[in-house]
């Protein structure tokens, strides 16, 4: 039983201190014109928004210069429900909000004879900023730690040594948390459309993508509460006080286990700040094909290849959250 307590402590600290590698997939979002909002089937478009949806269909434009600018306002509320036995009442609700007032789409095309030149500026990925005042990723480790202290270490010590008032009478925990994230991926595209004949036209082009992701937040002022032993107190101070006050009552093995657990706990920095940006860029080749029959039936096809982004991480004032590395 005592060995299990030590291993559990070691596991908690290991999981909260090690860095992890993450792989993220980024996908282009489709709602890049106001037309899409009211009519999302745009893949065979022959209007100006074909610059994005069906660039080979630009051969159907009338000759001359075409230009279009639109903007979208985005509002989103996210609701997260977590069911977990160590949470207060076994469940918790988390709420986040996104507001974005600038989300432009700019299209241009110039048609002359059988050739159309096109360009665009689009926010091809991301969706503005979102903020949270709490998240499961922040609370679940604290809930586990509180349960481990209350029902593991201190319950064992209280039962074996009869401490009164009991160290294990921990009623809850508090902490201050905030998280703000911003993600957007602007892009510039350039391409050429050629009308092979009245039925078929083809397209080739490139999209230059710039990826921007930033995160700011903090986790501070963690306390656990035991009304019988001083109310709210830093868990590191609580465990240190327990060990320093009661160590003379422990047998040799317990003294070693509780002492090592206390050392591990003191080494764990509960206050963390994060202020990180990740910036990168890449180029996407594109191809397209458009087939039409007597202006009554139109088929559009576009292929965008995988964009490889080389990201650089920028950590401000050493605020890496214990996760990221500058560079």
Image: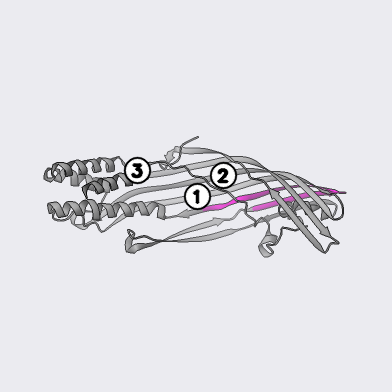
Query: Secondary structure under badge 3?
Result: helix
- Which residue lies under the disc numbered 3? 14
Badge 2 or badge 1: first in the primary sequence: 1
CA separation, marks 2 and 1?
11 Å
Q: Residues within 10 Å of mark 1 (few under 14, many from 20)?
A: some
- Which residue lies under the disc numbered 2? 212
CA separation, marks 3 and 1?
26 Å
Residue 185 in the image: state x and y as whole percent: 60, 47
Q: Quadrant of residue 87?
A: bottom left
At 77% across and 48% down in the image, what residue appears?
203
In depth, the one of 267 and 67 nearer the eye is 267
CA separation, marks 2 and 3?
31 Å
- Which residue lies under the disc numbered 1? 181
At 42% across and 51% down in the image, what residue appears?
178
Q: Quadrant of residue 170?
A: bottom left
Q: Which residues are magenta?
A: 104-129
Residue 136 in the image: state x and y as whole percent: 40, 55
What main secondary structure does the magenta stretch of the protein show?
strand
In depth, the one of 305 and 167 nearer the eye is 305
Residue 215 in the image: state x and y as whole percent: 48, 46
């Amino acid at each position: 039983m005592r060995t299990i307590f030590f291993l559990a402590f070691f596991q908690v600290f290991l999981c909260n201190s090690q860095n992890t590698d993450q792989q993220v997939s980024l996908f282009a979002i489709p709602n890049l014109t106001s037309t899409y909002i009211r009519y999302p089937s745009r893949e065979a478009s022959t209007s100006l928004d074909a610059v994005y949806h069906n660039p080979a269909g630009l051969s159907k434009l009338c000759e001359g210069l075409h230009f279009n600018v639109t903007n979208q306002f985005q509002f989103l509320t996210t609701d997260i429900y977590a069911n977990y036995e160590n949470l207060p009442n076994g469940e918790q609700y988390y709420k986040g909000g996104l507001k974005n007032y600038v989300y432009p789409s700019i299209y241009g095309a110039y048609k002359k004879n059988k050739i159309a030149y096109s360009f665009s500026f689009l926010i091809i990925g991301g969706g503005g900023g979102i903020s949270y005042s709490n998240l499961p990723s922040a609370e679940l480790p604290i809930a586990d730690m509180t349960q481990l202290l209350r029902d593991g270490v201190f319950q064992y010590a209280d039962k074996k040594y009869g401490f009164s008032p009991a160290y294990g009478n921990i009623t809850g925990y508090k902490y201050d948390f905030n998280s703000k994230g911003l993600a957007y991926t602007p892009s510039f595209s350039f391409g050429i459309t050629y009308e092979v004949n009245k039925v078929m036209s083809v397209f080739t082009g490139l999209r230059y993508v710039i990826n921007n992701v930033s995160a700011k937040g903090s986790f501070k002022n963690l306390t656990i509460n035991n009304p019988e032993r001083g109310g709210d107190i830093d868990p590191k101070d609580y465990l240190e006080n327990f060990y320093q006050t009661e160590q003379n009552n422990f047998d040799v093995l317990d003294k070693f286990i509780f002492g090592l657990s206390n050392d591990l706990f003191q080494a764990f920095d509960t206050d963390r700040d994060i202020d990180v940006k990740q910036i990168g860029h890449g180029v996407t080749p594109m191809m397209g094909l458009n087939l039409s029959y007597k202006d009554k039936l139109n088929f559009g096809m576009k292929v965008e290849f995988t964009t490889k982004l080389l990201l650089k991480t920028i950590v401000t004032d050493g605020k890496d959250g214990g996760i990221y590395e500058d560079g």
